[in-house]
Image (cartoon, rainbow, N blue to C red):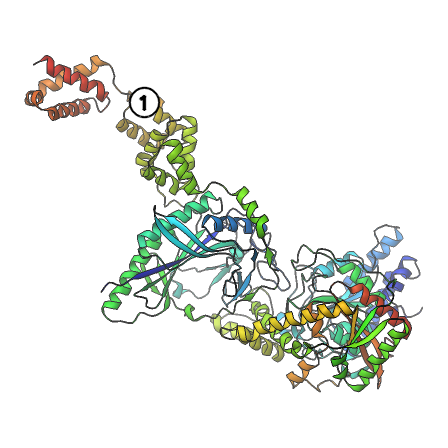
Amino acid sequence: MVLTVNIGLEIHCQITALQSKLFCSCYSDYRDKNPNNNVCPICSGLPGSLPLLNQRAVELAGMVSLALGCKVPDNIMFYRKNYFYPDLPKNFQVTQYNSYGITSIGAEGKLEYDESKKAMIRRVQLEEDPGRLVYENSDIDTNFYTLIDYNRAGVALIEIVTEPDFTDPKDVRIFLNKISSIVQHLGVCDTKLEGSVRCDANVSIGSKKKVEIKNVNSFREVEKALAYEITRQKTMSIHDIEIKAETRHWDDLRKITKQARTKEAEQDYRYFPEPDIPTIALGNEFLSLLKTIMPELPDERKNRFITDYQLSEHIAQVLIDNKEVSDFFELAVNIYPSPKEIANSIVTDLLAFIDDSNQKGSIFSGLKIEAKHIADLAKLVDENTINRSTAKMILRQIIKTGELPSQLARKTNASKIDDAGVISEAIESIFLREKSAVIDAKNNANAANFLLGKVMQLTKGRADPKIAFNLITRKLTESN
Amino acid sequence: MANLFSLTSEQITLGIKNGDFSAEEYICQILDRIEKIDVKINAFITVDKKGALEKARLIDRKIRNREQNIGPLAGVAVGIKDNICTNGLKTTCASKMLNDFVSPYDATSVKRLQESDAIVVGKLNLDEFAMGSTTEFSKNGPTHNPWNIDYVAGGSSGGSAASVAALECAISLGSDTGGSIRCPASFCSVVGLKPTYGSVSRYGLISYANSLEQIGPIGKTVSDVVMVMNVISGKDGEDHTTLERVPKYTLNPSKKNIRVGLVKELVEGADPAISKCIYYAMDVFSRLDFKCEETSMNSIRYSLASYYTIAMAEASSNLARYDNIRYGFDLNPDGYEWNMYFSKVRSNFGQEVKRRIIIGSYVLSAGYYGKYYLKAQKLRSLLKQELKSLFKKFDILIAPTMPLLPFKIGDKIDDPLKMYLIDIDTVIANLSGIPAISIPAGFNNNLPIGLQIMANELQEQTILDAALLFERATNIQRSPEL
């Protein structure tokens, strides 16, 4: 029996582009601050305080909605989601809700990914982040008390909810990469900051009960968590064990999902409209404003890369997946206009050195590389001063030293040997060593390639292969 | 020297500015009066002697130095309902839950009063979290009616009305969610205004039911109320629900031939002595050349049910934050598991508050939202529509403020439904957001009767014009001998 898999996602992105929180003027950047120092009467829920909506947050969430093909309604509203939890200063979360009419910033969107696949977006909503519970011991059950840090409370979140249309965890990963690239291109979220993107997923197989997976703190882990959960449910199904509708947490260390202690699925959130924030009329003015401030989206950029720079679909996609990489690419192209060579060197060589698990700062941090280095390298290749394999070796060096490729090439004599005399000497010695191959080569063109390989080996790859090949063919005909 | 404590705001400011007496002399009399009288009335929860004296001396210094920036309420003693935040002074909501809460900020209305040189003398008693109509549900005990101290002062701003009637302060701030300013104003024979929703900032008002309530002034005269409104009203960047353009108010009734509609259902439903008094009020208006007529309001039947559903729903959410983690009262959490601690903490709410939280949670819960909360909102819209068409015909609507005379303390405390019913006349203004005033209209058996005047949104000036003319024409006693 084939069981259909249905996966739906709830993606939370902090709007790290904001200076202040969603409803007060406290800093949005709560990281590395002393606990409970980044709070005010509003975000700590003091009696008598009232929320003041951050207008810029509405704009940024509006841009995300448009980028995900969502409708932006004329009027948006906020709702209270009531539940008791120690990290919630008011014991309700101000969020958006569509059960009584569509009033969230975005709804009913559609996003293409992985060339022709489509994901349906149920809604995009703005909401506030809760505070953080901090435990002294990593095993939660061994703690005698819980510490609460409200510094994060009230930070603006954009929640993207998809329809449960995904069937393959791999697709989910590709989709999440695209979301990540979109929020980066829009300048909404710095996805590398710890906890800035979080994803909850729900999984059901064979249209049975829905299991929520929470606590997945990076997009990379989602695919693993889903794969694990699908296997778990399928195994249970095969053995006729009932699958319960429940919330499970992803255990990052053991790479398994485990049952959550609280029965969150049964919560009744008693949603009702937030009386302190009147309905906000957006209308056409807002939409035209968004269109004027909307930066280039990943898809548009990719198409531009393909048409303007003649890059292949694949290369363009790899560059676009990470905004920093595509920015880096364009910087290099501005310095030296050889897009194909530059793209090639970034995608096939440079990306191999990048550790994208690095959570802080630029993905290039730790590497001493700038756009000018790649531009310089591409120039050396284009001018036939070095060949590609040498370029790769040079890259390996300069990312550690920060030296310019042209300087390094000169210093180590790594440049291509294009002096026919020098190459002829090398050929001479190879012909002496590989006599049988020389005889073969007179009748078999492939053997000539073997000889060329040997010459390249001897010159440590520095011989210009075109010149060398010509010299070899000439020498073979001469000796006939 | 004459009794300075009995002066109106206008007389106080003038007297101080003219040098007839100093702010310090005045405030000392007020503080003495509170000390002497409040044992009988129990209007104050906190008295800020030190702060009041300091502020008085500051004002006197400004006057001696002939400084220009003397505020429009210079020297006026003001009391603040204890659900409105005052920086550095306890704000308890008359609840054990906030027994030790000191706000780190001032409510906008308090800040504006301070800036206009009013003197905050203390914090006033109320029903716990403003939930009640008698000020009996207070951890500090009931406030007594100055006209007969065995009787309730009304509520929930009982302290605010009683303190003004008992001459313990010149003016006060109350809050009105379903009649909480007008009810005690009526019971204590003072003037109390619930402004248009959004004309006074709620920033710093501890929420009971956000979509219904407003802060408003209580004073001895219409002039008192106008002076306070001109200071506290207006757009506030701290409160999204404040309106863009809020007019200033004057004391020069200009409009002639005000069209008056007497709301028949409310008059008929009241105690006969009160009905008689309201008809008498209509006669007064007729003699003032107002165009008076009886009228009818159908949606009144549903207004109480709608009001209590919405108010309790909002309350259940607003009061969720009291978990005694960041502020509250003295209770050591050591040894408690979270849920146990939470239950222990929450058991400190009083009976009436618990009742409203439970009902409010119920009407919002899955499966009941549509049946109760949404239905209540629909009725609210119906009421608004009916009022809209009524205000095409009338400039003001008049009715009793309360359907009954002040009653004895303890009389209704065990019957919540009876207690809820007495808000029938006042909730209309809260549900629809319109302004409404209660002004003294007479007495029966030495117990005060209040006349309620309502007008369309932002038409406070029409209300104030009518109230001022009525006040001048009737001259009804404000403060009893104590």
Q: Dot 1: within a 10 Å radius of its alpha carbon, few (fewer than 14), some, or many (20 or more) residues?
A: some
The picture quadrant where one finds residue A316 is top left
Can residue A469 be seen in this snapshot?
A: yes
Residue at 88% across / 75% down in the picture? B284
Q: Chain of mark 1?
A: A
Q: Amino acid at mark 1?
A: Ala
In this orientation, which residue lies closer to the viewer: B158 or A99? A99
Q: Quadrant of residue A227?
A: bottom left
Please tell me which residue lies in front, A5 or B96. Answer: A5
Query: Which residue is labeled 1 in the image?
Result: A409
User: Closer to the camera, A112 or B349?
Assistant: A112
Q: Quadrant of the N terminus of chain A?
A: bottom left
Residue A65 screen position, x and y as percent: 48, 51
Q: For numbered disc 1, what is the local secondary structure?
A: helix
Residue B34 visible to the viewer: no
In the image, residue B73 sits, relative to residue B175, either above or below, namely above
Instruction: Return the x and y of residue A381 as percentages of the image width and height.
Output: 31, 24
Which residue lies at the image location 13% right of the left edge and 17% below the top edge? A429
| Whether residue B119 is situated above or below residue B150 in the rendered picture | above
* Count of numbered labels shown in the rendering: 1
Left or right side of A220 for B322: right
The quarter of the image holding the C terminus of chain A is top left
Would you identify the image quadrant in which residue A306 lies? Answer: top left
Residue B183 location in percent, x, y?
75, 76
**Whole-percent x, y for residue A35 in the image:** 52, 55
